[in-house]
Amino acid sequence: MKDRIGWKSLLMAGGLSLSLQSGLAQAAEYEMAIATLIPENINNNSIYPALVHFKNQVETRTDGELEVNIFGGGQLGSEVETGSQVQSGGRALQSTILTSGAMSSFYPRYQVVTTPFMFDNWRQAWSFFDGKWFADFMSGTIDDADMRYLGTFDDGGGFVAFTNNKRLIKTVDDLKGLNIRVEENPAHVAMMSALGASATPLPWGELITALETGLADGQFNAPVLNTTFNFNEVTDYTTLTGHVYNSASWMVSETWFQSLPDEYQRIVVQTAREAISMSHGASGAFATASWQKSCEVFEECYLMPTAERQRMADIARPAWKKWIVNDFGIKEKLVDDLWAEVDRVGEDLKQQDFARYGK
């Protein structure tokens, strides 16, 4: 006890005790909790490291006045559950990451982003999602859901690959007769049906069992997920087609955002954009490494050539468009505008690249 009293007296004599106690007692003026299903692992995905960067930089740039906490691995519930919490005004949860199915439940127009064969490469996808057209499109979430859009992450690396038990898929004809598990998303059902496969909508938790029992012959996911969840143990063949580009929207409560000082609003937005850019390259690297691993652990792998991808697209896209316009109720003009913007972005990149580096 005497030692403890002596140490306390020394601190007070040096004028340090008061400042130390004050620092410990001082709480951040604002808090931002972010929920995601992504595991809290900085080494196996591209989203969590980006969120860690965001946390570190926001807290530094606001001198600790805005504290950021990340809750990964689904700690705070499903995407729909966390989205509802954010939508309710951000009192307990201020931000969440929503993949395409969940995003569409809060902002139905987002379903247009499920367009099959939407992108040719990562740069086109990243440039589109980071561009003004898409930012304007996503601004509708403020009125529709009281959520503000900060940016788009790749979900598992973006482009997907089939895995199945029956045969190696090299052409669209190889899909005929296969029973493919899809998310509980009618867009995927329409696409598989157009390509000649049967679609079995199942939740994620039933997927492995469906493949083991033969309820489904195959499935598609990004290579990162195919290797992480060891689909090679229940399917033999994998083909990288990229027919779907999986995305994840970073959303923040608009009510909470407007409660921040203007300076902190700018810091949140600008730092989020840094984090999104940081995640892009990591996403491509993880996806490429996972595809290489797929070719090692599956019995056979196949990277579908551009010509055959185009053949599949020519079949899938009209059928998907008919579904989304006639059945889902999206205006045809929105579909056409989105497709035109994606094409413009891709062509601009080609022209800019050659103008800068090819001459």
Image (cartoon, rainbow, N blue to C red):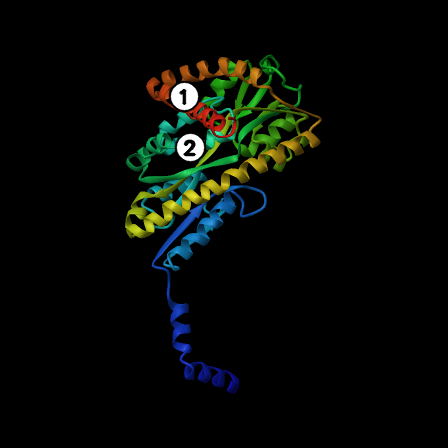
Give the residue at the far bottom of this rendering: 2
* Horizontal relation, residue 138 to residue 286: left or right: left
Whether pointer 2 and pointer 1 mark residues with C-beta atoms closer than 8 Å, the reply is no
Question: What element does badge 2 sit on?
Answer: helix
Seen at 61% across and 24% down, the residue is 218
Could you tell me residue 107's position as x and y percent? Answer: 36, 32
At which x and y percent is residue 160? 55, 28
Residue at mark 1: 339
Quick one: 225 or 301, which is closer to the camera? 301
- Up-down: is 56 above or below 276? below
Q: Is residue 204 above or below residue 169?
A: below
Percent of width and height locating residue 311: 54, 13
Q: Is residue 37 visible?
A: no
Q: Amino acid at mark 2?
A: Phe
Disc 1 crowd, CA 10 A, few/some/many (<14, 14-19, 20+):
some
Q: In the rendered image, is residue 29 in sight?
A: yes
Q: Is residue 343 left or right of residue 259?
A: right
